[in-house]
Image (cartoon, rainbow, N blue to C red):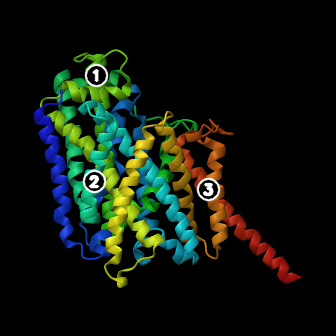
Amino acid sequence: MFTLVDWIVLAAYLLLSLLIGLWVSRGNKNLKEYMLGGGAMPWVAVGISLIATSVSATTFLGAPADVFGDDMTFLMFQIGGLLSIVVVGFVFIPRFRTAGINSAYELFEVRFGSKAVRRIAAVFYCLHLLLRTGILLYAPSLVLAQILHVDLKLAIVVSAAVAIFYTWFGGIKAVIWTDVMQFCVFFGGGILVLILIANAVGGFGEMATLASEAGKTRWWNPSMDISDARTLISAGFAYAILEIAIRGCDQQFVQRYLSCKDVKAANRSSVLSMVLGCVVSILFYWVGAALFVYYKVSKVGTLPAGAGQNDVFPYFIVNSLPVGVTGLIVAAICAAAMSSLSGAINSLSNTSERDFLGWDESKGMGGLKRAKIWTAVWGVLGVFFALFASTQQGSLLKNAYFFTGLFTGPLLGMFLLAFFVKGLKSWQVIVAVLCGMASLVLIQGIPAFGVPAVLGGIFSWPWMPFISMTTTVVLALLFKFFENLVGLSTKKH
């Protein structure tokens, strides 16, 4: 049961988030302070914020459910994550820091001399992040509504309102410092749950032995099967491309790199986020294994008839945690949801002001005022898409994977072209990007509209960004090659 004490704990957490936003807002005197923290944010805080943004409430709830129903083979994604850190550290961060930009997509105008390419990239990013944010806000709100016995729409609106409020006041500083607090609550909640379950089943040693005997600790699968996401080739290589696309091309990440004082600090923050991400994944996968031991092996607890793997952790939170601890765990779910939303709307606001309106600091305070309006607008749109997600009958996970590959892969291709290929024309980049997006329709169809895939079943979901990225790069190079060929032929005649 969710008691009065639990409500007090939850309310205290939400209030503290608001107070942090108000406190750090005092230093925001211009748009650069609001969006980049003046370029002087501590790298440790930025690193924690990076992982808090990456680790959504779906990790808190989804990772335990995945292990409860299967095993820990998705831990191999950390191999891809490690590779991505190296690439982003050597290729992306130094170029962002030395290009004199304030937005990730400003780089395209610098490299290609085209505002059209810059704005198309910004549109793709906004669409992807808005759709992703809607899903990341809806999924935990669905669980919160069940635990708190409140209407789903109310759960979505309240958690979103708090995140919008402190982000509106404090900008990137509020996002980063609330992310630090939210990560502590999120991580501490996972440790507390693991300790409570271990004590209930006879200690950590006994729990680990029983989980291993049940096959829940299996994490290595050296198979080269590209149709299975739980293999080394998919998790080690394809997922690395996905991580590079997110860590190297997502304005949420780039904005944090630019908020550090220099390249070294930005790289330290990136490495720290990778280390913490690995620790978080291990922790919550073990929570899933512990829940399996608790309910299926030791049978300390009993699940209701018909409970699916996604229902196990929420049921445990409501029925098996001590008074007050339940409130803390629910606060952790709220923390993860609000972290996803706050980081998203802040970066969307920066993209709107920088990439669509082209604002710079020399024009005074108008940009700061409009950026705050954009923050509110994007927050409301995020709520709208969360409410829209609640009406969908199809798999939210499949839709999320589709839109991730649809937008992040071509964006990664655009950045690689900007970094390493000279002389490309804007139309060549734009057409190549559109073809890269179209390639996914052949491989994956359009799940949201029930459009079947022509070549479905060949590739697992981690390969989607790789396919759309490769198509984009190859076609852009071919366009450039044939144009040069035609130019040479014309000169000869």
Which amino acid type is marked by label 1?
Answer: Val
Badge 1 vs badge 3, beta-carbon distance below 8 Å: no
Q: Quick one: SS at disc 3? A: helix
Q: Which residue is mark 1?
A: 293
Q: Earlier in the sequence, mark 1 or mark 3?
A: 1
Badge 2 vs badge 1, beta-carbon distance below 8 Å: no
Q: Quick one: SS at disc 2? A: helix
Image quarter in which the N terminus is found: top left
Q: In this orientation, which residue lies closer to the viewer: 244 or 82?
A: 244
Q: Earlier in the sequence, mark 2 or mark 1?
A: 2
Query: How busy is the neighbourhood of tag 2: few (under 14 within 10 Å), some, or many (20 plus)?
Result: many
Task: Give the CA separation, mark 2 to mark 1.
Answer: 36 Å
**Mark closer to the observer (2, 1):** 2
Which amino acid type is marked by label 2?
Answer: Ala
| Residue 166 percent across, percent down from the top left | 24, 58
Q: Quick one: SS at disc 1? A: helix
Question: Looking at the image, which residue is at 34% across and 47% down?
Answer: 55
Image quarter in which the C terminus is found: bottom right
Residue 233 in the image: above or below residue 146: below
Question: Looking at the image, which residue is at 37% across and 41% down?
Answer: 138
Q: What's the mark number on residue 163?
A: 2
| Residue 237 percent across, percent down from the top left | 51, 48
Query: How busy is the neighbourhood of tag 1: few (under 14 within 10 Å), some, or many (20 plus)?
Result: many
Residue 138 in the image: above or below residue 130: above
Task: Give the CA separation, mark 3 to mark 2.
Answer: 37 Å
Residue 449 in the image: above or below residue 50: above
| Residue 41 percent across, percent down from the top left | 25, 68
Q: Quadrant of residue 248?
A: bottom left
Question: Looking at the image, which residue is at 28% across and 53% down?
Answer: 163
Q: In this orientation, which residue lies closer to the viewer: 400 or 269?
A: 400
Q: Quadrant of residue 474?
A: bottom right
Q: Which residue is mark 3?
A: 470
